[in-house]
Image: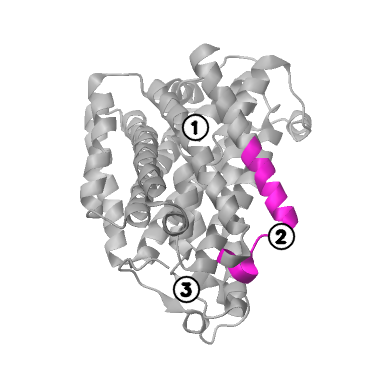
Amino acid sequence: MSKFKRREHSESFKTAIGTKKGWRQALPFVGPAFIAAVAYIDPGNYATNIQGGSQYGYLLLWVVIVSNLMAILIQTLSSKLGIATSRNLPEVLRDEWKPGVAIFYWIQGEIMVMATDLAEFIGAALGFHLVFGLPMIPSAVLTAICALLILAFQVRGFRPLEMVIATMVFIVVIAFSCEIAFSMPQFAPFMAGFVPHFQGAGSVMLAAGILGATVMPHAIYMHSGLTCRRVIGKNASEKKKIFHFEMVDILIAMIIAGLINAIMLTVAASTFHGHMVISDLDVAFKQFGNFIAPSASILFGIGLLSAGLSSSSVGTLAGDIMMQGFIHKRIPIFIRRVCSMVPPLAVIISGANATGALVMSQVVLSFGIALAIIPLVIFTSKKRIMGELVNRTLTTATAWAIAGVVICLNVFLLYQTFFG
């Protein structure tokens, strides 16, 4: 067991439950999955969903559903690892494998966080630019200030930060719920989108993009960090009960994230399919105003802004957890936040295409997905590590199958990006 301890609030299972009855018993455990779920509604998802809907209509709606189911299982394993071991995935990896491996994982983890922050920071800046009509550089400065303010809530503990993140997620939900009311999707084509099928090689490629971008490396590392010492189970029975309560959190948060992605694709399909293919977020913003109403553009921009700000803060938190776990070092989180903002600020100041930068960040993230999933499945399959919460045989087999699919898709995407 690692001797390194982070300074954080934790409580026993009995203290957390107290005298609560019924559904109220689950309330102390709600929060971590909402922070992790933000990774699934970041600006990168906006780009793939809008393009998928505008180009192929409702065809790839089933892909969004399948990708969400995959994400639920992966995040469940991460959460379960933290509950069973009272350690996060980086800590378990450092304790189980050689120190040199942990150092390698820390270096690649920092690269993943920078790529993540690049996409999310640029997405938030683009949101300010679109909604308020500000130039990109002032939008970037405003994004930096807001990101620091959001992160300041963590000083008072995880619960205030979770409340802020959850609020911003629901802003995205409200924005796109209004969008779908405006766009009025057709029922029959919409229902046909739930039937798995493709239309040519292009749809397969885009489906690979949606599935390949589903599981974000930083969300895997972070979720175990959010549950490992939040509520401590003293025995196997208490740990099982904690896990059951955390499953409620995971299902609610991930179903909401999946619903948001499905709505994005549906709105794009009902609005743009048959008229134009949209691959740039700024073009989507303008065309929502042309096809529906100016208010539809504003709602899209507000959703993008909220998703970008919340996901950017989560990336910083993930980097903090990884550094502490892999090498047992840490830097003040505000210094980390400032350092992580330098690359996206440089991209914006240089005048580079924002959507192009988003795409390249997803390419970089593709390299880290296998490195996150493989140790997660290995560790959660070992009874010595997990105790009574060890994976069942079917769970392990399913997890390896999902890992194989995600890894193959990302290899395919990398090949297409550089050689296709």
Q: CA distance from mark 1 to mark 2?
A: 28 Å
Q: Is residue 202 left or right of residue 297?
A: right
Q: Is residue 326 left or right of residue 253?
A: left
Helix, strand or loop under label 2: loop
Q: Which residues are magenta?
A: 385-404
**Which residue matches tag 2?**
392
Determine if residue 268 is in view.
no
Helix, strand or loop under label 1: helix
Magenta: main secondary structure equals helix
Q: CA distance from mark 2 to mark 3?
A: 24 Å
Where residue 23 appears, as percent x and y from the top left, is: 61, 74
Vertical side of 112 occupied by 37: above or below: below
Q: Amino acid at mark 2?
A: Arg
Q: Amino acid at mark 3?
A: Val
**Which residue matches tag 3?**
231
Sooner in the amino-acid sequence: mark 2 or mark 3: 3
Where residue 356 appears, as percent x and y from the top left, is: 41, 21
Q: CA distance from mark 3 to mark 1?
A: 33 Å
Q: Kindly report which numbered mark, 1 or 2, lies closer to the viewer in this rendering.
A: 2
Residue at x 20% of width, y 49% of height: 335
Mark 2: few/some/many CA within 10 Å (<14, 14-19, 20+): few
**Which residue matches tag 1?**
366
Q: Kindly report which numbered mark, 3 or 1, lies closer to the viewer in this rendering.
A: 1
- Whether residues under marks 3 and 1 lie with C-beta atoms below 8 angstroms apart, the answer is no
Helix, strand or loop under label 3: strand
Farthest bottom residue in view:
19
Q: Is residue 243 magenta?
A: no
Sooner in the amino-acid sequence: mark 3 or mark 1: 3
Q: Where is residue 115, by image quadrant?
A: top left
